[in-house]
Amino acid sequence: MLPNGMCNLLNLRHLDIWGTPLKEMPKGMGKLKQLYTLSYYIERRARILDKKHIDELLLKWSSADMVSDLQIEGDILNSLRPHTSLKELRIEGYKGVIFPNWMGQHSYHNMTYVSLKSCKNCRKLPSLGQLPSLKSLRVEGFSELKCIGDEFYKNEDDPTLHVAPFPSLETLQFEDKICDVGRCGTYYLAQKLFLSLRSFK
């Protein structure tokens, strides 16, 4: 257990507790709005949205966790929505079926890197196509993902937003074999849709 007075370190910039056996965080950790680095946070009401100085965020689920309710899993990830100033996002072991809408919102204009790993229950990718600054995207460990649909390229919640999908993407890496990438086909996906793409694996 961390000291109860941790919440009083209002100017704390970096907190690395990766690999520790913590089961819960001290109350009031949401007051630490100056954090740049937060390696691990298990409290559901983390209020990451208030922490505008966090540049990199890793949200990791334990492989030993049992899934009791897929809706609850989705609600947890939705509640961990970061501030729009975030630059790099990594999600590992997420056990929900779908990703929250905030991941594909155009307002995350600083996001340059996204890594999605071992999200084995997900059947759809999040709507990342409208992230204007996204340069690198890595997807692996999606055993239930058989098709990449239109939702990957556009945010269906905002049909009025007419922005070319993935305008800045340079590196796209899929570690799993995807049977269907939509009506466009693999060649179109790599050569036509992602105009700035340099690496496609």
Image (cartoon, helix red, strand yellow):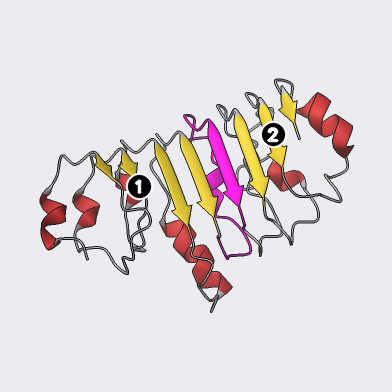
Q: Which mark is residue 85?
A: none
Q: Which residue is mark 2?
A: 172
Residue 125 image offset from top left, x and y in percent:
67, 50
Dominant SS in magenta: loop
Which of the 4 image quarters holds residue 71? bottom right
Q: Residue at x 61, y 31 (%)?
A: 136
Q: Residue at x 53, y 79 (%)?
A: 68
Report whether residue 200 is seen: yes
Residue 120 image offset from top left, x and y in percent:
66, 62
Magenta range is 94-118
Residue 37 image offset from top left, x and y in percent:
33, 41
Give the secondary structure at mark 1: helix
Q: Which residue is mark 1?
A: 49
Q: Say which of 182 and 64 sits in front.
A: 64
Mark 2, Cα crowd under 10 Å, few <14 / some 14-19 / many 20+, is some
Report whether residue 155 is seen: no
Q: Is residue 181 left or right of residue 65?
A: right
The span from disc 2 to disc 1 (Cα, nearest Å) is: 27 Å
Q: Is residue 45 left or right of residue 10?
A: right
Which of the 4 image quarters holds residue 150? top right
Mark 1, Cα crowd under 10 Å, few <14 / some 14-19 / many 20+, is some
Give the mark, 2 or 1, whose residue is nearer the N terminus: 1
Q: Residue at x 57, y 65 (%)?
A: 95
Q: Say which of 33 and 116 sits in front.
A: 116
Residue found farthest to the bottom: 68
Q: Of the residues shown, which amino acid type is indicated by label 1?
A: Leu
